[in-house]
Amino acid sequence: MLTVDTLKRLHVSVSFELADGECIALQGPSGVGKSLLLRAIADLDPNEGSIKLDGTAREAMPAPAWRKKVTYVAAEPGWWADTVQEHFIAWREALDLVEKLGLPSSCGTWPIRRLSTGEKQRLGLVRALLLQSRVLLLDEPTSALDPESTASVEAIVAERVSTGTSVVWSTHNGAQARRVGSRLFMMSSGRIEEHLL
């Protein structure tokens, strides 16, 4: 269970609980702070409030350990080396997920500059999934994907949710929010409210 209590970031105060195997869909207009909220939960940006995982406070563990358990996946993942496989500790372990997301196993040798935005999104998600995180914070993970690739991402995340992974999924797509979420949170200026799906 992830417990967020009075988390403050940019004049927005948020409190909620996220159970194991639950997916919250997060919606709101561009610029309202959805990404900032997810980054704050992952402890990537300054924030105030209390966040606990299974009763253990975020401050009780080193930041890298927290981020391995509560993992933020950016809409535009970062890349720091020349080829795809250099971004993976164990490329062979990634191949099953890579292929399920519609990419060839040979893409490990591809230079990063060759990748489309959608390919980067899918490979960034694979990197996160390999961590076996307790909580995934997905920031518009399908914004650059076609319907087939979107369906593949939704299926893989649903599979993880069914085995106990908790997810907060930011999306502008109302239909997607209803497909992936068991709860829906709407962000607007200065507040967040739960809505019925």
Image (tube, helix red, strand yellow):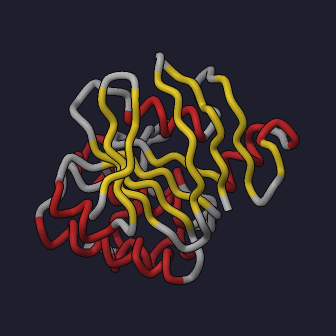
114 displayed left or right of 61 = left
Residue at 26% x, 38% y: name it: 28
Q: Position of residue 164 (x, y in %)?
A: 59, 76
Q: Is residue 78 visible?
A: yes
Residue at 52% x, 57% y: name it: 136
Q: Position of residue 113 (x, y in %)?
A: 28, 41
Q: Is residue 116 visible?
A: no
Quadrant in which residue 15 is drawn:
top right
**Residue furthest top as drawn:** 11
Residue at 31% x, 53% y: name it: 195
Instruction: Say if 120 sits above or below 94 in the image.
Output: above
**Residue furthest left as drawn:** 147
Q: Position of residue 104 (x, y in %)?
A: 29, 73
Residue in the foreground of this view, choosing between 1 and 153: 1
Instruction: Say if 62 sits above or below 173 in the image.
Output: above
Residue in the foreground of this view, choosing between 170 and 192: 192
Q: Position of residue 18 (x, y in %)?
A: 57, 59
Q: How many marks?
A: 0
Residue at 33% x, 59% y: name it: 122
Quadrant (top left, top right, bottom left, bottom right) of the C terminus: bottom left
Quadrant (top left, top right, bottom left, bottom right) of the N terminus: bottom right
6 displayed left or right of 191 = right
Quadrant in which residue 178 is drawn:
bottom left
